[in-house]
Structure formats: C-alpha cells, structure tokens
C-alpha cells in the first residue's frame, strides 16, 4: 500500500504545481488584459482543478478506509521521509487558494469597470437620442427665455 499511495501523492503534487502555474498565468493575463490567453487557460484550469479534487477525494477515502484520520499520521507511520512532499502539497494548496482569491478580485474589478463604462455609454446614447426632434432639427431643451424675445 505504501508505494502506490506515495506514487499517487506524487501525482497530486505534480498536478498541484501545474495548477499553481496556471493560476499565476491567469493572473498575468488578467493584469495584461489578455482575454485570448484567459480563454485558452480556462478549460485547462477547470480540468486540472477537477483532477485535483478527485485526487484529494480518493486520498481521503483511502485514508479513512484504512482507519487513518489524516495524512500526517499516515506519513509518520508509513513514510516519514516523505513528510516534505506533504508539506509542499499543503504550501502549494495555500498558494493556489491565495492566487485564486486574487484572480477573483481582479475579475470582479474588471466587471465593475466594464459596468461603469457601459453605464456611461448608455447614458450618452440616451442623451444623444434626444438631441434631435422628429423634424430633424436640434432639440435642445433650455429653461429660460428664447433669444430675440422681449
């Protein structure tokens, strides 16, 4: 059981490294406003995230099946020399969470900016639509007296 479990843990580590790299690339694309790259990264990011979730689910189920509550306990008993691998996985998971949070904030900021821009454009278009009357003449509403009237 030790060798297959360690091989699976190593696969999880490799996938997590890839995921952190994808999130860093996503962040750079967000900062550079590079939508083409964002679209290309999106599918890979989703697939990698799903793989990681499945790996973690499998790992937890395996531990519970063997009556072990956490990875630290299993490593201490079966592979103490590999505790560094688990520490790196935990560190990368934290880094992925931070990157994902930051990327979400960047996306929300872009959405707010785009909404503000659209509001300005719609407001301008509405004002421009009232600039001319049905007869084709300018329709400038002004309060006060007309020039030439006494």
Image (cartoon, rainbow, N blue to C red):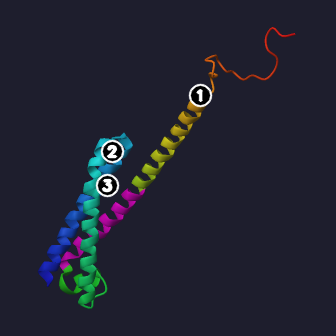
Discs 2/1, front: 1
> What distance separates the C-alpha of mark 2 from that of mark 1?
37 Å
Q: Give how far across and how far down residue 57 sits, in percent.
A: 28, 76
Q: Which residue is mark 1?
A: 129
Q: Are marks 2 and 3 in contact (CB under 8 Å)?
A: no
Q: Is residue 31 above or below residue 100?
A: above
111 with respect to 127 (left or right): left
Q: Residue at x 23, y 76 (%)?
A: 83
Residue 115 versus residue 3 in the image, above or below: above
Badge 3 density bin: few <14, some 14–19, many ≥20, Cα 10 Å: many
Screen quadrant of the C terminus: top right
Earlier-in-chain disc, 2 versus 3? 3
Secondary structure beneath dot 3 equals helix
First-in-chain label (3 vs 1) = 3
Location of the N terminus by quadrant is: bottom left
Q: Which residues are magenta?
A: 81-101
Residue at (38, 43) in percent of width and height: 31
Residue at label 3?
A: 23
- In the rendered image, the vertical position of residue 11 relative to residue 101, given as above or below: below
Q: Residue furthest front?
A: 135
Position of residue 38 measured from the top left corner of the image (x, y, whole percent): 31, 47
Q: Is residue 148 above or below residue 43?
A: above
């Amino acid at each position: 059981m030790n060798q297959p479990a360690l091989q699976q843990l190593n696969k999880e580590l490799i996938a997590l490294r890839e995921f952190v790299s994808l999130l860093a690339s996503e962040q750079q694309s967000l900062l550079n406003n590079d939508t083409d790259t964002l679209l290309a990264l999106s599918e890979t990011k989703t697939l990698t995230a799903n793989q990681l979730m499945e790996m973690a689910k499998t790992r937890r189920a395996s531990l519970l099946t063997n009556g072990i509550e956490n990875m630290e306990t299993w490593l201490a008993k079966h592979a103490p020399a590999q505790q560094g691998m688990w520490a790196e996985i935990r560190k990368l998971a934290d880094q992925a969470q931070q990157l994902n949070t930051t990327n979400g904030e960047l996306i929300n900021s872009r959405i707010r900016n785009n909404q503000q821009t659209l509001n300005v454009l719609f407001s301008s278009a509405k004002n421009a639509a009232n600039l001319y009357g049905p007869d084709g003449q300018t329709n400038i509403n002004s309060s006060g007296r007309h020039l030439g009237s006494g």
